[in-house]
Amino acid sequence: MSALAEIRDLSVRYISDGGEVSALKRISLDVVAGERLAIIGESGSGKSTLALAIAGLLPGSATIEGRIGWQFQASRSFPPPSVLPDISPTRGEIGSVAAGSPSARSAIGEAGNDSLISPLVGEMSGRTEGGAVERRLSGASPIPGRDIGFVFQDPSASLDPVMTVDKQIAEVARTHLGLDWPQAYARAKHLLGRVRLPDPQAAMHAFPHQLSGGQKQRVAIAAAIAAGPKLLIADEATSALDTIVQAEIVSLIRQLVAEDGMTLLFISHDIALAAELAERLAVFRHGGLVEIGATEQIVTAPRQPYTRALLDAHLGLDAAPLLRQAPA
Ligand SMILES: Nc1ncnc2c1ncn2[C@@H]1O[C@H](COP(=O)(O)OP(=O)(O)OP(=O)(O)O)[C@@H](O)[C@H]1O
Ligand code: NI
């Protein structure tokens, strides 16, 4: 199993009027290509900061140390659409680097090829908060919105309120895949079907406010995967939804990730939900990585007392419900 992203000694501090917050402290972990990895921890433990750092979307007020090395492999199950020649040199380079080749290894191993994790200009569809300061990418660094799809807790944060949903999804496809509008709209229509909106035809021309919370989140997911990203990051993507809709969205994410061969980074304060979806769990506390391991190991035999306490708090001293949900 190879790493899609190698995070090494990643520290992030936010500097604001109120002083300095150390949001991540020397985090090292691998995001394995094709895995479903969940980041869990209580509020303020640094989960979203990690997600934003990986996506290159940290605000300008953040000071970043450490590095993230990337290795992209051409996805067999979901090649980039062949409708038009790929006009992006970065994509071409990523796609042509065979796993295990010297250049693929160097994308991770050598400092010169690591992505400088400076704050990036957000390229997600819709709005991006935070200062876009500078952009320095090496050849194998991912582009947010294209190589990394991001789904937030509040779909309104990524959806434009005055643009029809089909146009928003089409715009992502147009921007990142070089499609013309008819092709991009066709892709939007296809994606709206894939995210199982009740009436995709009607939803096409709807504005976000005309949709329910769950439907908006489906649209946001369609936009997030419109460019065929390798990595999908869902940051509390279901936290604002009621339990039934939450389960539906989790199942949708699981299905899309499997069908498209994506790697999933699922961020949640809900351990039960995370354990249901993820193969591995990483437990964060106060900006530090407490432990990381297979879901079953973390749930049944946590190595750290804090993880035990976290599980107990959620489970009332009984791990059985989680175990039944954990993937085999
Ligand atoms: N833009 C920012 N400016 C200043 N401090 C911030 C900023 N974003 C996050 N923080 C602080 O950094 C720490 C980590 O925050 P982060 O949002 O990463 O935690 P989290 O685990 O995602 O929490 P939650 O579960 O509440 O979303 C917290 O102390 C938070 O207040
Ligand atoms: Ni968060």
Image: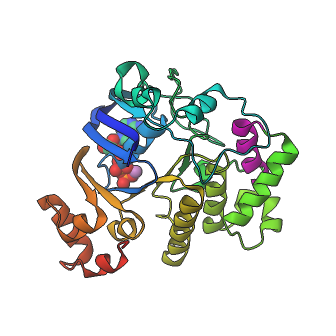
Position in image of residue 30 (x %, y %): 34, 44
Residue shown at the point (39%, 30%) measured from the top left? 108
The quadrant holding residue 86 is top right
- Marks counted in the figure total 0
Q: Is residue 297 magenta?
A: no
Kindly tell me whether residue 29 is visible in this rendering: yes
- The furthest residue to the front: 101
Residue extending furthest toward the right: 182
Nearer the observer, 5 or 39: 5
Q: Give above or below for 244 relative to 69.
A: below
Left/right of residue 151 with respect to residue 305 in the rendered view: right
Residue 39 left/right relative to 9 = right
Q: Position of residue 307 (x, y in %)?
A: 19, 61
Seen in the picture, residue 250 relative to 8 is either above or below; the reply is: below
Picture quarter with the C terminus: bottom left
Q: Magenta region, mostly helix, strand or loop?
A: helix
Task: Residue 115: give x, y in percent of width and height.
Answer: 44, 26
Q: Residue at x 69, y 64 (%)?
A: 194
Q: How is the image coloured?
A: rainbow
- Image coordinates of residue 236 in percent, x first then y, are 45, 58
From the viewer's perspective, is residue 73 above or below residue 133? below
Hey, which residue is sitting farthest top in the picture? 112
Residue found 61% across the figure and 36% down from its top: 123
* In the depicted structure, whether residue 278 falls above or below residue 90: below
Taking the image as shown, residue 247 lies to the left or right of residue 324, namely right
Q: Which residues are magenta?
A: 164-178
* Residue 18 visible in the displayed image: no
Residue positioned 46% across, 26% down in the render: 103
Q: Quadrant of residue 256?
A: bottom right
